[in-house]
Image (cartoon, rainbow, N blue to C red):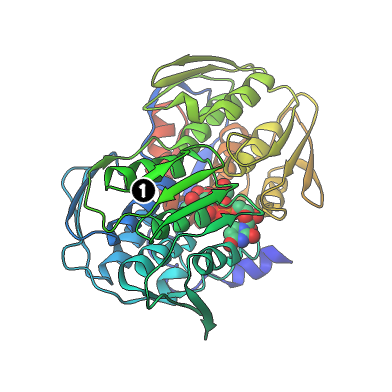
Amino acid sequence: MKIDQERARVTDSEVTATGMDEIRVLGGYRLQGKVAAGGSKNATLPLLAATLLAPGTYRFTNVPELKDVSTMLEMLSRFGIKSHRTGTHDLTVDSTGSHNAEAPYELVKTMRASIYVLGPLLARYGEARVSLPGGCAWGPRPVDLHIRSMEQLGAEVDIDHGYIVARAPNGLRGGNISFDVSSVGATGNLLMAAATAAGRTTVENAACEPEIQALCEFLVSMGARITGICRPQLVIEGVPELHPADAPMIPDRIEVGTLLVAAAITGGDVEVTGVDPTHLGATLSKLEAAGSSIEVAPDSVRIRAPERPEPISVTTRPFPGFPTDMQAQFMALLSVGNGASTIVDTIYHDRFTHVAELMRLGADIRLEGNTAHVRGLPALSGAPVMATDLRASAALILAGLVAGGETRVSRVYHLDRGYERLEQKLQALGASIRRVKA
Ligand code: EPZ
């Protein structure tokens, strides 16, 4: 049983004091008020990796305080890159003294996005040694598209003792890449490697997620020449070198979506600020389809939700489709819907480790391959549950907001990877929720 395997897989590096804290929620409180969303984790990680491309000082603002950000900064420090926070969400990065080194397994296995150093190392130093990330809670997550992209730019890539060993002794040269599958990470690595490759690189079926758009714009501000930004066809004209730049991190559209679902599941009335509504199209239209009324302003969204959501069908797709990172949160919401819903994840066919835990709270969910059939119930009942991955932990907290009695979510180190003080933000909106130290 995967969950049991998962239980057995917590390594000592993960069992830290905060990591084994519990989040305890008392259900039944309607959320209302205003809450600010933070900067995007999934934009911060590639932009930090891009500082390997040009030595110098970079100033970032709206940088979230997350475990994954600290892990990336720890990874970059192995390459001689220094960083320090100059304010709660401002970060200065100094890559003046950067040098090549290995991206070690003990760091890469804790965060798959570490693979974002592959393209920059190869572009800057002509070789890279990056550990394979391995699987995650919901199954294998291949990196073949990353490797093939580097090869299309002229690199030789081998897998040696669990490491990706890539070499481009004569430097990288432009190539034509067509992705069979839209991949955020592989598109990011390709962009960073192609920016200083000799000649033109064309990309078909590039990921168009806002985080990749942000990376393109950041690379252009560093001197890269990229056209077709936020379209699936990208053209990169290689330039001899790049220079440091400053950037604000875009809002975290998944944190925003999670806060909106927290309002929806409690029949609440909440305004989320620090938002870019153009990143939220699919999420907002699904919330409206489930019965909420949504008011959109230039940098905020207000949601007013009915007592119980209406049943809907949801299918995850690459941006601008419905994000897979919102799938678990919507499953919690639809578990208390006014009828039967279906959720299909076309991006990750096995991203359903949250199902077994939601069922412990009484949810009625039947899995058929990558389709979840959710029969909405008038109530869930609180119980101890275990977070298995980042978005699953958020989904369990959302379910706890509406479950009768107390829900205890353990292994919150998953939550802390991608949400900054979520329990405090929910508490400020009226939730009865607290973190209990291990
Ligand atoms: C990014 O992961 C996000 N992470 C994920 O968010 C998100 O779920 C995912 O994109 C999809 O939107 C970051 O941005 C740090 P992919 P990534 O490459 O880049 C397959 C979160 O919760 N694939 O777009 O790793 C893959 O198996 C995290 O914040 C290959 O087959 O995802 C999947 O089916 C979880 N070969 C599909 O492509 C490859 O070489 C999309 O994956 C790479 C990917």
- Residue lying farthest to the front in this orientation: 199
Mark 1, residue position: 44
Which of the two residues, 221 or 326, is positioned nearer the viewer here?
Answer: 221
Q: Residues within 10 Å of mark 1 (few under 14, many from 20)?
A: many
Q: Position of residue 282 (x, y in %)?
A: 61, 29
Q: Is residue 343 above or below residue 55?
A: above
**Image point 81% across, 52% down: which residue?**
369
Q: Is residue 433 above or below residue 119?
A: above
Quadrant of the rendered structure where residue 142 is?
bottom right
Q: Quadrant of the C terminus?
A: bottom left
**Image point 63% across, 47% down: which residue?**
383
Q: Position of residue 166 (x, y in %)?
A: 45, 76
* Horizontal side of residue 233 vs 92, given as left or right: right
Picture mark count: 1
Is residue 137 visible from the viewing direction of this image?
no
Which of the two residues, 322 or 306, is positioned nearer the viewer here?
Answer: 322
**Image point 41% across, 67% down: which residue?**
172
Q: Position of residue 135 (x, y in %)?
A: 59, 67
Q: Position of residue 10 (x, y in %)?
A: 53, 70
Quadrant of the rendered structure where residue 14 is?
bottom left
Q: Is residue 16 above or below residue 203?
A: below
* Horizontal side of residue 93 vs 333, given as left or right: left
Q: Quadrant of the N terminus?
A: bottom right
Q: Amino acid at mark 1?
A: Thr
Tell me: is circle 1 under 8 Å from ligand 1. Answer: no
* Horizontal side of residue 334 vs 232, given as left or right: right
**Image point 61% across, 49% down: which residue?**
182
Which of the two residues, 60 or 195, is positioned nearer the viewer here?
Answer: 195
